[in-house]
Image: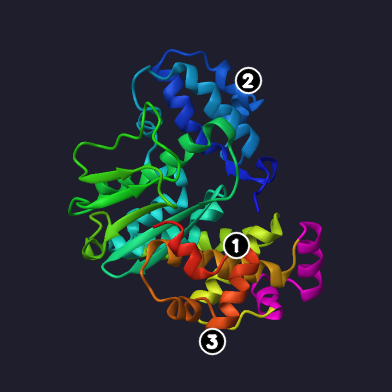
Amino acid sequence: MSIALKDLTFSVRYMEVMAGLLNERGAPQSVLLDALHLTDAQLHDPHQTIDGEQYQRALVAALPYCWPGQSLSAQYLEHVPLTITGPLGLLLMACATLDEALTAVERYGTALFPAYFMRKEAIKDEVHIVVARLSDFGEVDDLLTEIVLGMFSKYELFLAEPLDGVELYFRHRQGPKGVALPSTMNCKVHYGALVDKVVFPKRLMAIKVSTKSRVMQVEVTRTLDQLLNQDLQAHPCSQQTIRVIRDLMDAGKDLHGDVVAERMGLSRRTLNRRLQEEGTTVAGVITKVRMSFAETLLLTTSLPVVDIARRVGYSEVTNFSRAFKRVYGCSPSACRDNVR
């Protein structure tokens, strides 16, 4: 289920990336303003928001000003400070460890950058941040994905130790100007992968954040929780429902429509109506979340199917296999075999 670009909402501060690139290349400010259909005052208004269509046009507008023969995503990443994500960036700097920071990315990332959903998974001796694209940005879709995953390299500046052994995986094929990360970061980049993700060796989770601040962490977490609660009331409803269901599943809670509605601050009837307007149901979203998680585990781990069934809430593997086949058209085992 792809979310239309016009239904996405971003803070205008994300445009500082394109503004910085265009300014460095001597482009007139009108290039960005014309792409966004904003005035200069709106561009610098901290309360201004833009939608996904404006974001897409801004990315495209900056392309002609990129240096030929160099990585496109690297040129954009040069102008991406960690603080571009606002309160989430402050929280990442205030966390005590890398593990805390990645947990914060999973919890708040989509609320601050709704084009992607990020899920943190501990798999054997690794920690995977699986990134799911929620919208299609057309010709700049792969570029934006490289920028989003490449931003993890920015975090090394705030860590007490280097991020040694990190790997980035992209579903798209490598173009003539693939992603380029800082030479100080010992990171491998893979293209044509099954999912978009960043993989950290689990040993790195204990790395301390040099800018940690417990007071700041509490203050910013409070702010982010307020934003998250506000976001749960916003459309598209299905996107927010997915996030709540994932939280309930992680906590081992029963996935019932009444529980989901209560967590979202809605009546069951209101939740049903809003989801019906978007062409789905509570049961449909619950199944989507379960099967999406199951697919990720099938493609990125060697866990037995029976264990995966339990991880996604099925006590009987036959019921899980039947549900998986309805969604993907093949059994869980066939899904895994098809990519070997």
Please report the bounds of the magenta region as a residue range: 257-279
Q: Amino acid at mark 3?
A: Ser
Q: Nearer the viewer, mark 1 or mark 2?
A: 1
Indicate the quadrant where residue 282 lies: bottom right
In front here: 212 or 110? 110
Q: Is residue 286 above or below residue 213?
A: below
Q: CA distance from mark 3 to mark 1?
A: 20 Å
In the image, residue 122 lies at what x, y percent?
35, 68
Q: Is residue 80 left or right of residue 209?
A: right
Q: Is residue 160 above or below residue 59?
A: below
Residue 220: tell me if it is visible.
no
Residue sitting farthest toward the bottom? 315
Q: Residues within 10 Å of mark 2 (few under 14, many from 20)?
A: some
In the image, residue 184 lies at what x, y percent?
18, 40
Q: Residues within 10 Å of mark 1 (few under 14, many from 20)?
A: few
Query: Which residue is tagged 3?
Result: 315
Q: Amino acid at mark 2?
A: Asp
In front here: 245 or 123? 123
Q: Nearer the viewer, mark 3 or mark 1?
A: 1
In the image, residue 20 lies at what x, y percent?
43, 26
Dominant SS of magenta comes to helix
Q: Amino acid at mark 1?
A: Tyr
Query: Which residue is tagged 1?
Result: 328
Residue at image point 63% right, 27% down: 36
In front here: 89 or 21? 21
Q: Nearer the viewer, mark 3 or mark 2?
A: 3
Q: CA distance from mark 3 to mark 2?
A: 55 Å
Q: Is residue 176 magenta?
A: no
Query: Which residue is tagged 2?
Result: 34
